[in-house]
């Protein structure tokens, strides 16, 4: 590579790893790298804040199943992005973040010096530093391998003088990846089958690992044979579809009536690509006395929140397919489960509230669900808004719901929606609250600039709603949780987006125009009834 620089080598390596989109925000530390993107096929997608840049890579990774790649500048560039990096780690999202470091000479006296690699330790992500030009191949290869095998972010420090200096003389070669599905140990599979056969009321909990594996058919076959209801985490809500006769709905905080009826009797649970986090177990209340069989491709995920009776390391689809052949058939139990799910109340039939010039957020979600394709992607933020789409925006098979379920990051939904739209170029329905939206509002401009078809429904209760409701419940009053907000529709228009204020369900007709020509964002300032609390409140 005559006259090629370290930046050239890095970009060539990204192409070799199959990377087509690079997210980030420019600064002194990565300006040389980004200058060199003009000569490469990798498309640079910049945000207005580092939290958003990393969040875009997160959403992109979730819907593509590939590693999301991002570049940040040194010091405050990385610290601004740390929240999204930690969020991705908690949810097991594979990312590689290249941090443009200060030059090696005089590094510790530079204005924006920070030991970036050390910062990776407390948020439990892989970190490495490029010490010399010849170290680039190792560092890049190790980061991609860590992201894929650990299912989480990897951080790479690349000093500025290495970016500008001569490239290594060798050609970058990615680490070979397994082409066959990893099958669990046969003896452990036999133990798992015994646990499930011995149960009176087995259940299956599917998570993001099941979605990533494409395990829908194998899960259905196993559930039908075993006579087990299927519960899902947020991350697998659309794997079977909310209308599947064996899918009882989301487990944990935002349970459907069907799930609430069946889940308490489960005495043996098969967790398929699900980590059994607090949200899906009501912080240990659910499945407290059940035998647990846990399947995960990541050995480190086994027992993260609860030690399983039997832990299986392997691919979710392969494991469920094998178990379906090994467990005993229970057709009568299957029919009972189907009947119970069919007879349960439909969330759409639950009572709603009315108020002048305000709308019930549950009705808003149902109305938007009717308009958007049921196999599309929905992103959800953290706060009082979370539970409404989780329960009242049904998805069909193939639909996806993206939420930062294990860290609760405010401002997650918009970046994830932007990354999804970059990957798919199909309309995305993004639910956020006014508090969360105002933390990332500047990146409405990113959606405009990139012509991303994102409908941003801001469920606006003019407060940090979940905090407000909890304060009133626990203290009998509220403090610093309510505020008069700006005109969000006018703010969005100022950033170049189409926008509307929604005070009635009829005002949502503007979404039809958006869907007929989805060539940019639409922001909906949805004035919601302030005293409607999200499902599952209290106490979760």
Image (cartoon, grey):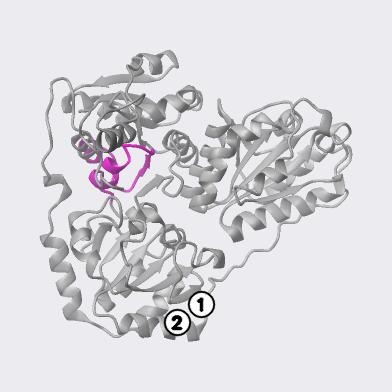
Instruction: Judge left or right: residue 339 versus residue 423.
Output: left
Q: Is residue 49 above or below residue 327?
A: above
The residue pinned by badge 1 equals 184
In the rendered image, residue 269 lying in the magenta stretch gets the answer no
Which segment is the magenta one?
367-395
Q: Counting other residues with Cα less than 10 Å from the Cα at mark 1, is it few (<14), some (14-19), or many (20 or more)?
A: many
Along the viewing direction, whichever of 221 and 526 lies nearer the viewer: 526
Residue 66 x/y as whole percent: 55, 51
- Residue at image location 57% in from the left, 53% down from the top: 152
Label 1, secondary structure: give it. Answer: loop
Residue 91 x/y as whole percent: 48, 51
Q: Are marks 1 and 2 in contact (CB under 8 Å)?
A: yes
Q: Is residue 197 above or below residue 306?
A: below
Q: Earlier in the sequence, mark 1 or mark 2?
A: 1
Along the viewing direction, whichever of 263 and 514 lies nearer the viewer: 263
- Residue at image location 25% in from the left, 62% down from the top: 247
In the rendered image, residue 377 lying in the magenta stretch gets the answer yes
Q: Can residue 369 be seen here?
A: yes
Residue 375 x/y as whole percent: 32, 48
Q: Is residue 493 above or below residue 230?
A: above
- Residue at image location 77% in from the left, 25% down from the top: 111
Q: Is residue 208 above or below residue 536?
A: below
Instruction: Judge left or right: residue 4 versus residue 505.
Output: right
Q: CA distance from mark 1 to mark 2?
A: 7 Å
Label 2, secondary structure: give it. Answer: helix
- Residue at image location 20% in from the left, 31% down from the top: 531
Residue 530 x/y as whole percent: 22, 28
Q: Which mark is residue 189?
A: 2
């Amino acid at each position: 590579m005559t006259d090629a620089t370290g930046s050239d080598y890095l970009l060539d390596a990204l192409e070799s790893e199959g990377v087509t989109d690079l997210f980030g925000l420019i600064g002194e530390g990565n300006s040389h790298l980004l200058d060199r993107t003009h000569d490469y096929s990798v498309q640079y997608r910049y945000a207005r804040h580092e939290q958003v840049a990393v969040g875009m890579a997160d959403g992109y990774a979730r819907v593509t199943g590939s590693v999301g790649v991002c570049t940040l500048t040194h010091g405050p560039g990385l610290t601004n992005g740390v929240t999204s990096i930690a969020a991705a780690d908690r949810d097991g999202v594979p990312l590689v973040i290249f941090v443009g470091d200060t030059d090696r000479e005089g590094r510790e006296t530079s204005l924006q010096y920070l030991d970036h690699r050390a910062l990776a330790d407390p948020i439990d992500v892989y970190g490495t530093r490029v010490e010399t030009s010849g170290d680039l191949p190792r560092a890049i290869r190790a980061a991609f391998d860590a992201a894929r095998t650990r299912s989480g972010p990897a951080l790479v420090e690349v000093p500025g003088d290495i970016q500008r200096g001569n490239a290594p003389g060798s050609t970058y070669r990615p680490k070979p990846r397994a082409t066959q599905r990893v099958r669990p140990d046969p003896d452990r599979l036999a133990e798992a089958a015994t646990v499930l056969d011995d149960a009176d009321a087995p259940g299956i909990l599917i998570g993001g690992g099941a979605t990533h594996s494409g395990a829908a058919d194998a899960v259905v076959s196993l559930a039908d044979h075993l006579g087990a209801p299927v519960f899902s985490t947020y991350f697998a809500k659309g794997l079977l579809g909310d209308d599947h006769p064996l899918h009882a709905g989301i487990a944990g905080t935002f349970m459907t009536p069907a799930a609430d009826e069946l889940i308490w009797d489960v005495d043996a649970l098969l967790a398929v690509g699900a980590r059994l986090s607090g949200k899906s177990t009501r912080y240990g209340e659910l499945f407290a006395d059940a035998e647990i069989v846990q399947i995960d491709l990541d050995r480190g995920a086994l027992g993260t929140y609860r030690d399983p009776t039997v832990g299986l390391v392997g691919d979710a689809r392969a494991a469920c397919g094998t178990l379906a052949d090994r467990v005993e058939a229970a057709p009568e139990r299957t029919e009972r489960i189907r009947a119970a799910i069919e007879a349960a109340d439909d969330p759409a039939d639950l009572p709603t509230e009315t108020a002048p010039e305000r709308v019930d957020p549950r009705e808003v979600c149902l109305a938007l669900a009717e308009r958007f394709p049921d196999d599309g992607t929905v992103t959800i933020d953290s706060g009082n808004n979370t539970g409404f789409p989780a329960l009242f925006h049904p998805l069909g098979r193939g639909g996806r719901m993206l939420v930062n379920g294990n860290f609760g990051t405010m401002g997650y939904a918009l970046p994830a929606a932007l990354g999804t739209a970059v990957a798919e170029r199909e309309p995305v329905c993004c639910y956020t609250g006014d508090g969360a939206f105002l933390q990332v509002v500047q990146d409405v401009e990113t959606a405009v600039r990139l012509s991303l078809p994102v409908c941003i429904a801001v469920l606006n209760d003019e407060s940090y709603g979940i905090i407000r409701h909890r304060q009133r419940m626990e203290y009998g009053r509220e403090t610093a949780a309510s505020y008069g907000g700006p005109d969000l529709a006018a703010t969005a228009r100022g950033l170049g987006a189409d926008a509307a204020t929604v005070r009635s369900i009829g005002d949502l007709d503007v979404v039809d125009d958006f869907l007929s020509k989805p060539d940019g964002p639409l922001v909906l300032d949805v004035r919601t009834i302030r005293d409607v609390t999200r499902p599952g409140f209290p106490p979760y």
